[in-house]
Image (spheres, rainbow, N blue to C red):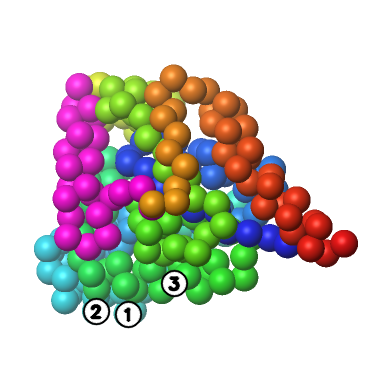
Amino acid sequence: MKINIAIDGPSAAGKSTIADLLAARHGYIHLDTGAMYRCTAYKALQEGIALDDEEALGRMLQETKMKQTPDHRFFLDGQDVSEAIRHEEISRAASQVSRFAGVRRDLVKRQQEMASEKGYILDGRDIGTVVLPDAEVKIFLTASVQARARRRYEQDKEKGILTQTLEEVEHDIARRDDQDIHRQNSPLRAAADAVVIDTSDLSIPEVVERIDSYVQPWLKKGEQTHE
């Protein structure tokens, strides 16, 4: 029996990295929901659509195709935008477009349809509360702003896309936290039944093992059901 795993948390908490490792461990599919909002923001900027024009964004999405390949490449209307959507400018724009109910309805519907077959790991900011409220395992990853800023800074530096100082990255993360927490539609918050894990002082392998300790009982339950 396969289950669905929901991983929520603020920007740069390590959600995507952890989800990738868990997916590889269990043969699951990691659906990067954040990349879908980044694609929306990227296309809007490319087409000159105002990020605060909900109606125009909705019309754009009706004519938009998104695809994630097994090797975690993201295609937008047939174009590989895997690297293009990872810049900080797109990250900030994604936070803006994600405020709108119409945008969220469109993308949440796509995400729910994909995960309906089970065996998915979704990460984002409203997975356990809105997208997959019936997920068997719900995790809320968090970390201090300082720890997350350091991770994002080193990550961008390693990828060769560093355009900000560490202080600027920290400021952006704090500002995005405020936007995500206080937005009207699907604000960032832990589901009532989510396990909260502070990753500030944990290594990636330690976080993976911690989450896996909550996954294993469900997998064993499935094995017993099929015996």
Q: Residue at x 27, y 28 (%)?
A: 145
Q: Is residue 44 above or below residue 91?
A: below
Q: How many marks?
A: 3
Mark 2: which secondary structure? helix
Give neighbour class at mark 1: few <14, some 14-19, many 20+ (Cα, 10 Å).
few
Q: CA distance from mark 3 to mark 2?
A: 16 Å
Q: Residue at x 44, y 63 (%)?
A: 133
Mark identifier at residue 59: 2
Indicate which disc, 3 or 2, sits on the residue closer to the N terminus. Answer: 2
Which of the two residues, 162 or 8, is positioned nearer the viewer here? 8
Mark identifier at residue 110: 3
User: The magenta stretch spans which residues?
Assistant: 167-191
The reply to whether dot 1 and dot 2 touch (C-beta < 8 Å) is yes
The amino acid pointed to by label 3 is Arg
Give neighbour class at mark 2: few <14, some 14-19, many 20+ (Cα, 10 Å).
few
> Could you tell me residue 7's position as x and y percent?
47, 48
Q: Residue at x 60, y 51 (%)?
A: 71
> Could you tell me residue 55's position as x and y percent?
16, 76
Which of the two residues, 134 or 24, is positioned nearer the viewer here? 134
Q: Is residue 48 above or below residue 181?
A: below
Mark 3: which secondary structure? helix
Q: Residue at x 27, y 69 (%)?
A: 103
Is residue 123 in view? no
| In this picture, residue 41 sits left or right of residue 50 | right
Give neighbour class at mark 3: few <14, some 14-19, many 20+ (Cα, 10 Å).
some
Indicate which disc, 3 or 1, sits on the residue closer to the N terminus. Answer: 1
The amino acid pointed to by label 1 is Gln
**Residue annotated with mark 1:** 62
The label nearer to you, 3 versus 1, is 3
In the rendered image, residue 187 lying in the magenta stretch gets the answer: yes
